[in-house]
Image (cartoon, rainbow, N blue to C red):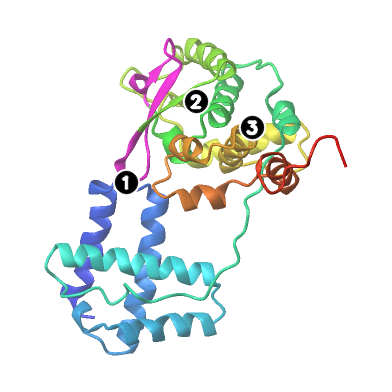
Amino acid sequence: MTPAARDWLQRYARHLATERRYSPHTCSAYARDLAHLSDWCEQQQLADWTDLDAQHLRSFAARAHAGGLGARSIQRRLSAVRNFYAFLLREGAARNNPAIDIRAPKAKRMLPKALDADQMGRLLDWNPQTPLEARDLAMMELFYSSGLRLAELVGLDLLQMDLADRTVRVLGKGSKTRIVPVGGKAIAALRIWLSERRGMAKPDTSAVFVGRNGQRLGARAIQLRVAAAARRQGLPVTVNPHLFRHSFATHLLESSQDLRSVQELLGHADISTTQVYTHLDFQHLARVYDEAHPRARRKRGGA
């Protein structure tokens, strides 16, 4: 690839970080996937992004598959390429999007795991003894209460919370804002933490959750603190922030069967994401079907 062609990768990375406001983790994933494409183009002696066509990308995907890359990872790579070319089209640096009709091998749909209500209750049933423990409990209560993504909780500022109204305004993927409710247990934990925060946070720090240094707490530190709390409570599984989000969605959906509302609370642009992200117990579905469907309802009384 020419230096000018490689420069578009840097421009795209800046676009994702500044315009789309993607998390550093997502930006790094895009960069890795496009770096694989760039290396492959070098091997094929393709000098510019306009030289790439659909057949090239089929070969690119086939080579990755033959090399042992899983279907889901290939799907992610092709998605990154499609989005990159959409950016090039917008900037006038490409004439078409060669990835638009390229399909990856079908991947098995893996259902994320969730803690059941008893396990979640056990995880959150403890009294903090230190300011840091008060912070950790408030983080976990908020994760479970409102289904926040890790990046959303990391970026949460004081002005985004309204404890009186019991809501929090979060900035999600693609710079989309949504307002989600906060439960009573989380409100109580947040009030305790905010009273402790006054003695810890730097004066110029707007972050809700801060570390020992008084500055915004990072994603890795939150992951470690959550895992440590789960071990202390004797949970038999490894707990991470994403597990709270999935448990939140699963428990809501099991109780309400309202997929659209759960989609809104999670901030999913496409309801198919929510359908994969959450699952209902099949016996419950079968019971609802038997009770509700005109051709399935059992007759009461008589022969």
**How far, Cα to Cα, is label 3 from label 2?**
39 Å
Residue that carries the numbered disc 2 in the rendered image = 212
Instruction: Give the extent of the magenta segment.
Output: 157-177
Kind of residue at disc 1:
Gly
Kind of residue at disc 3:
Ser
Which label is found at residue 255?
Answer: 3
Left or right, 300 with respect to 134, comes to right
Q: Residue at x 43, y 20 (%)?
A: 167
Left or right, 97 with respect to 202, comes to left
Q: Residue at x 51, y 17 (%)?
A: 190
Kind of residue at disc 2:
Arg
> In the rendering, at what x and y percent does residue 255 appear?
64, 32
Q: Quadrant of the C terminus?
A: top right
**Can residue 78 be found in the magenta stretch?**
no
Query: Within 10 angstroms of label 1, few (less than 14), some, or many (20 or more) residues?
Result: few
Above or below — where is 117 with respect to 185? below
> In the rendering, at what x and y percent does residue 18 appear?
24, 47
Furthest toward the right, the residue is 303
Left or right, 261 with respect to 250, comes to left
Q: Earlier in the sequence, mark 3 or mark 2?
A: 2
Q: Secondary structure at mark 2?
A: loop
Q: Residue at x 39, y 74 (%)?
A: 36
Residue that carries the numbered disc 1 in the rendered image = 174
**How far, Cα to Cα, is label 1 from label 3?**
29 Å
